[in-house]
Image (cartoon, rainbow, N blue to C red):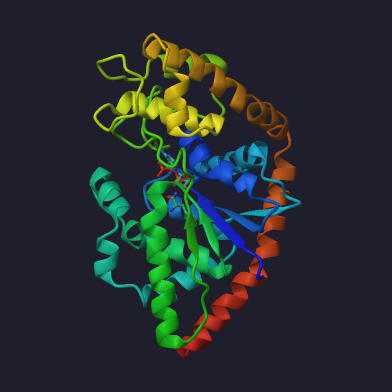
């Protein structure tokens, strides 16, 4: 059987939170022995909204350190920076000549992010999913482990690959999204109706994977809950549903098992207290490894260069095939 190729990306746009961790990174780490693994710090995607150059530069390195600290193993997986491999920009152009305006207009992330932008919306925010499709298709990816919010973009990638292949011949592999059962959509603790996100300000919105035990405690204990005491997942009660979802993601239990576990809880306070303990213990090894790695940025930079050098030939071959199929190059 052909070997699976796993590819996924993360934006270096701020502190990594438990949504990123349970929705994506945990799957990346767990699957490392089963496939060829390529992970990308998508700095070109970060430019679709305003960034401070020096801050962005620092965040690229910091995000790399978090990923290595989370267990991405350079002996098993390639981790690299998107802008270090020029082929990402190049394939984006060819795919943007296959994508239609209509299909990009249907992307919910564009609608949400463009509404959130004061002033000008950048053209790159609109074509963002085409760059993401290029990321995935360059490496003959079979599986894309992502959180729920990225499913629509992976579907678009499949569609572009199918359209391209139908018009120009079999160049691209059609990838599948891989979305975890628990933790695929963790909501903000300050507002459980909004997805937890790096770019939402406020110290009680997200639990960051590098938060201290005290910070974790403060954020969880201040989480917005609903009126009532029943510890049950219910769309009408997004607060407790989110806490149960985080518990399930952290322990590997199902949502039903989480409900059963808390059947005797005397209210939401009990759930929160136990959740604090579990999160502190789950994140402790990551925080400790990060502290070691952050003292050696040179090694991390070298690993990123090695990652880019290892994947570039694959990307280059794919772009050549795509260009040739379209009648250029
Ligand atoms: P930003 O706020 O900068 O847009 P983000 O926090 O939404 O970032 P990304 O870098 O865009 O995170 O996403 C990295 C991975 O984390 C993706 O696979 C995405 O689906 C997943 N992810 C992001 N937020 C969540 C969440 N709240 N719950 C589960 N998975 C998430
Ligand atoms: N769009 C994604 C990040 C991303 C990605 C990718 C994920 C860019 N390229 C390729 C998977 C595969 C996001 O906003 N989370």
- The residue under the point 55% across, 77% down is 319
x%, y% of residue 117? 27, 45
The residue shown at (55%, 34%) is 252
Residue 1 horizontal side relative to residue 120, left or right: right
Residue at 49% x, 72% y is 90
Q: Quadrant of residue 199?
A: top left
Residue 280 percent across, percent down from the top left? 57, 20
Vertical position of residue 108 compared to residue 193: above or below:
below
Q: Is residue 308 left or right of residue 261?
A: right
Total numbered circles:
0
Q: Which residue extends farthest top?
A: 266
Image quadrant in which you'd find residue 238 = top left
Question: Vertical placement of 47 versus 223: above or below?
Answer: below
Q: Looking at the picture, how far across and down is residue 154, in whole percent?
A: 42, 60
| Viewer-nearest residue: 29 or 113 | 29
Visible residue check, residue 121: no
Q: Is residue 27 above or below residue 244?
A: below
Q: Is residue 132 above or below residue 326?
A: above
Q: Quadrant location of residue 218?
A: top left
Residue 94, can we see it?
yes
Which of 254/269 is in front? 254
With 32 as the anchor, is 110 left or right in this view?
Answer: left
Q: Quadrant of the N terminus?
A: bottom right
Where in the figure is residue 103, as x and y percent of width and height?
A: 28, 67
């Amino acid at each position: 059987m052909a070997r699976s190729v796993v590819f996924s990306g993360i934006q270096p746009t701020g502190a990594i939170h438990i949504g990123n961790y349970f929705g994506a990174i945990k799957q990346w780490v767990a699957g490392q022995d089963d496939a060829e693994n390529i992970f990308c710090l998508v700095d070109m995607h970060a430019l679709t909204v305003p960034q401070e150059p020096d801050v962005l530069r620092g965040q690229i390195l910091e995000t790399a350190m978090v990923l290595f600290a989370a267990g991405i193993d350079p002996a098993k997986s390639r981790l690299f920076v998107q802008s270090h491999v020029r082929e990402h920009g190049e394939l984006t152009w060819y795919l943007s000549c296959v994508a239609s305006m209509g299909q990009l207009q249907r992307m919910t992330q564009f609608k949400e992010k463009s509404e959130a932008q004061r002033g000008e919306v950048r053209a790159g925010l609109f074509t963002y999913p085409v760059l993401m499709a290029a990321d995935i298709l360059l490496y003959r990816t079979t599986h894309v482990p992502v959180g729920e919010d990225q499913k629509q973009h992976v579907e678009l990638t499949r569609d572009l690959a199918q359209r391209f292949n139908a018009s120009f011949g079999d160049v691209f592999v059609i990838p599948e999204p891989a979305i975890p059962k628990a933790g695929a959509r963790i909501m903000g603790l300050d507002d459980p109706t909004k997805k937890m996100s790096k770019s939402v300000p406020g110290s009680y919105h997200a639990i960051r994977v590098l938060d201290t035990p005290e910070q974790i405690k403060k954020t969880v204990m201040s989480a917005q809950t609903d009126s009532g005491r029943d510890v049950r997942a219910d769309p009408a009660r997004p607060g407790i549903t989110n806490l149960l979802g985080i518990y399930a993601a952290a322990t590997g239990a199902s949502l039903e098992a989480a409900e059963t576990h808390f059947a005797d809880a005397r209210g939401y306070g009990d759930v929160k207290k136990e959740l604090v303990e579990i999160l502190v213990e789950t994140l402790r090894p990551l925080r400790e490894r990060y502290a070691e790695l952050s003292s050696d940025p040179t090694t991390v930079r070298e690993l990123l260069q090695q990652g880019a050098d290892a994947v570039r030939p694959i990307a280059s071959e794919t772009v050549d095939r795509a260009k040739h199929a379209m009648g250029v190059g």
